[in-house]
Amino acid sequence: MLEKISEKFTDIVRTLGGKATISEKNVEDAVEQIKLALLDADVNLRVVRRFVNATLEEAKGEKVLRSVDPGQQFVKIVHDRMVSFLGDTRQDLQLRGPDTQSVILLLGLQGSGKTTTAAKLAFMLKNKGRKVLLVACDLVRPAAVEQLTVLGAQVGVDIYREDSSDPVRVARAGLEKAKRELYDTVIIDTAGRLQVDEALMEELLKVRDAVKPLESLLVADSMTGQAAADIAKAFDEKIGLTGVILSKFDSDARGGAALSLKTVTGKPIKFIGTSEKPEGLEPFYPDRIAGRILGMGDIVGLVEKAQAVYDQKEAEALQDKLESETFTLQDYLEQLGSVKKMGSIKSMLEMLPGLAGQIDEASIDREGMKYEEAILRSMTVKERKNHLIIGPSRRTRIAKGSGTSVAEVNRLLKKFEKSRLMMKKMLKNKKYQQQLMGSGGR
């Protein structure tokens, strides 16, 4: 995500960040590059002007030009400006306690991913201990109700639906069901149109007045760039928004929507869609996104992904195995599964400092991982627990069973041995561990 804008900003940061002295001309040149990068990212023109003027005004002061480390001081200013334009701090949902009902109204144009987002949000809240009811009020798009029904079943959340053409009636009936059966959270999926029009707004106003939502969230397609901010502004003026969810954020290489929305609408981005999976909805952290755009990575986000997959006991057990050289191919197979749960390899690499915007999609060997898993699954449990018994005849059988070659089986075994040795060295090097801990804590 954000590959194009990240690549350009990373180059700017590298050029100026390491300079021991900088002049006003250096600053002006860098700010001009920033302006071009923002325009190319499809950021709203008014937002670009405000960003550039604010950065230039602060960067040309004595605090930068006369500082001990002016390059880094300039980078900090750009980072802080970007965080501010993205929304300053994380904005969570404003929900009542579990003893009272909270209604979330989802709005958006057709094709924005609203129905999918409704299911993802329900899944997230269910995992936080809320009792969630999805209400199908998109009675315009063919199969929208059926889609929400299928998605609700997939995430284990109940749905209310009616054979009706009146969304207000369905919304009210859904709320009544929620009150009777003690659902504390109601998510209402509403109809969209191909564009903002009076008929759409009139219908949404009636639904809004009927359900009195705590949160009215626009689901906007981040791929539409600054147009997402214009759509959000139109919805806010007519309906009144409390926030925005940017869908398809994992496919957005430019970042125009994220950088334009808060300034244009004044409304916070609360969540971003990061995959098609039920868990593919993440809180929006302005400082982390700014760090990724500037090539600084997102170590905290990466650690959180890992913590969601590994518990502390599993991590300690794995470390013990590595240190005592009892790490086996069975453990290796389990680690491949854990990595897949954390998301795409590309998204994880982008969280590492210096790699954002530098990763070529084609260079990530997904096929290699798939074949490795096939090879490992073609082994017996005994072989995975003791790879030393895998002689020529066993290697031939494993290759046939996995649809690979003996050479590929040999390559995996060599890679495993090398990886095990490297990990053991890393764990023994306490200084290296402390450096890692230090970088993760900043």
Image: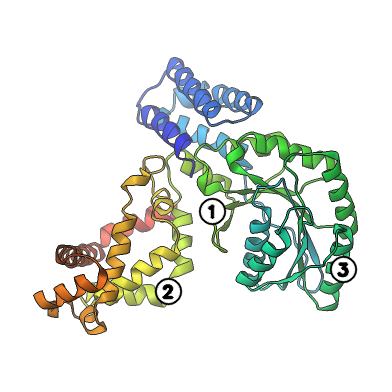
Say which residue appears at 64% left-offset and 52% top-offset. Answer: 113
Q: Name the residue under label 3.
A: 173
Say which residue appears at 52% left-offset and 36% top-offset. Answer: 254
Question: Which of labels 2 and 3 is toward the front?
Answer: 3
Label of residue 274 in the image:
1
Q: Which of marks 3 and 1 is nearer the N terminus?
A: 3
Secondary structure of the residue carrying tag 1 is loop
Query: Which color mode does the image show?
Result: rainbow
Give the spatial CA distance, label 1 vs label 2: 26 Å
Q: In this view, does 386 lie to the left or right of 258?
A: left
Residue 54's place in the image compared with 365, above or below, is above
Give the image location of residue 235, x and y in percent.
78, 42
Residue at the outermost front position: 142
Q: How crowded is mark 1: few (under 14 residues within 10 Å), some or many (20 or more)?
A: many
Q: Is residue 283 left or right of residue 376?
A: right
Question: Which of labels 1 and 2 is toward the front?
Answer: 1
Question: Which of labels 3 and 1 is toward the front?
Answer: 3
Give the spatial CA distance, label 2 vs label 3: 45 Å
Say which residue appears at 41% left-offset and 48% top-offset. Answer: 350
Q: Name the residue under label 2.
A: 312
Q: Residues within 10 Å of mark 2 (few under 14, many from 20)?
A: few
Residue at the outermost left position: 392
The disc labelled 2 sits on which kind of residue?
A: Gln
